[in-house]
Image (cartoon, helix red, strand yellow):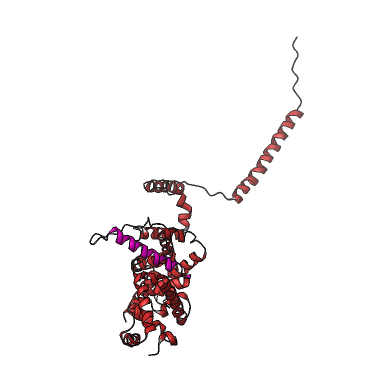
Amino acid sequence: MGASAALDYDAELMLRVKDGDGISFALLLNKYRASIIHFLYRMVQDRAISEELAQEVFLRVYRSRETYEPTAKFTTWLFRIATHLALNWLRDGRNERKQERLDETNEDAPARELADRAPSVEQQMVRQVKVLEVRRAVAALPDKQRAAVLMHKYEEMEYSQIAKVLSCSESAVKSLLFRAYETLRGRLAHMA
Amino acid sequence: MNCPIKTQENREWLLDYAAGHLAEEQAVVVKAHVETCHECARFVEAQQLVWNALSQWEPEGITDDFDRRLYRTIEDAKPFSWINRIFGPLQPVLWRPAFPLIAACLMIVAGVLLHTPQLPVTPLDSQARVEKIEPDQVERSLDDMQMLRELDLKPQPEVPKTM
């Protein structure tokens, strides 16, 4: 019921954008900005590129306002655009330096505020190593499997919605996810 | 329930059970099965490890000017109106204080043009005047020539010679 109400509200906002309401666009941007950037960041694993792609996602949403029809859930439409752009970017081979960047320390990342219980240097290093392992394992997945895992894990999307985003059947998504998690279980088993 | 791994039925239930996303009704069934099936228990344990490892991967922060850049891109992408196309390059010159002055000048010029008396001259009138004047001139010229001829023909009075 909650999801249905959310669907109606987002679609309604988009229909208002269609009528020229800029505030509704700002509301949608505010609501989905972080989700889209984080999803794209985990897909391409580059902060600058993920923001660049996210800009393109919201630009396309804005440009499509006049032809928008609420035939699908708004988030499905939004993530379909984002996934399409990310897969294209990965396919175009613009990720040549991606693997190199994974090995670099992330200098452009903002310093995290850890004022309350600041972990020791050793704990921080252990954590960084673990995250690097996870990033490498995810980066090694085939693009479509990676997109499916990210939507399933971080966006908590249902199989049917992931299927619509990836334009495939629900059973195909389940197979994709099963294979992807199988690979991840093999790669991350040593982290136990 | 049948073993999801052996029968391939509802395999996703194991994934969702490990993630804690399975509906309560189904979760009870899977839990009962996992307690008796060593293979599924191992699967769930390994999947939970992956799930927790993925949770450690926090996303990067978002730059502060993301929205500003987006709105600027949207603004740049908007098509120009024909007024902008024409006067766009002149915008630095056409600054606002000049507008009243330009408007006043235009009004004065318009006023002068509207109040200047002008006789309408049609092409037919000018042609008619030419036609009317031309025979008179010819007639006068002929009269003059006749008079000159007569003067030439008249005998000159003899002038007495004085010694």
Residue B46 visible in the picture: yes
Residue that sits furthest to the left in the current view: A116
Whole-percent x and y of residue A2?
31, 79
Question: Which residue is more in the foreground, B2 or A81?
Answer: B2
| Nearer to me, B38 or A67 | B38
Please state the extent of the stretch shown in magenta in the rendering: A120-142
Farthest residue toward the top? B163
- Residue appearing at x 48%, y 78% in the figure: A168
Q: Quadrant of residue B130?
A: top right
At horizontal 67% and vertical 38% (from top left) the residue drawn is B140
Residue A131 lies left or right of residue B144; in this view the side is left
Closest to the observer, A184 or A77: A184
How would you classify the magenta stretch by its main secondary structure?
helix
Looking at the figure, which quarter contains the N terminus of chain B? bottom left
Q: Quadrant of the C terminus of chain B?
A: top right
- Indicate whether residue A187 is drawn in magenta: no
Taking the image as shown, residue A95 lies to the left or right of residue B142, namely: left
Q: Position of residue B93 (x, y in %)?
A: 43, 46
Please say if A67 is above or below B158.
Answer: below
Quarter holding residue A17 = bottom left
Vertical position of residue B108 compared to residue B21: above or below: above
Marks counted in the figure total: 0
Question: Is any atom of residue B13 visible in this view?
Answer: no
Q: Is residue B140 above or below residue A185?
A: above
Above-or-below relation of A80 to B63: below
Q: Residue B39: x percent and y percent?
A: 39, 83
Left or right: B73 as drawn, with respect to B160: left
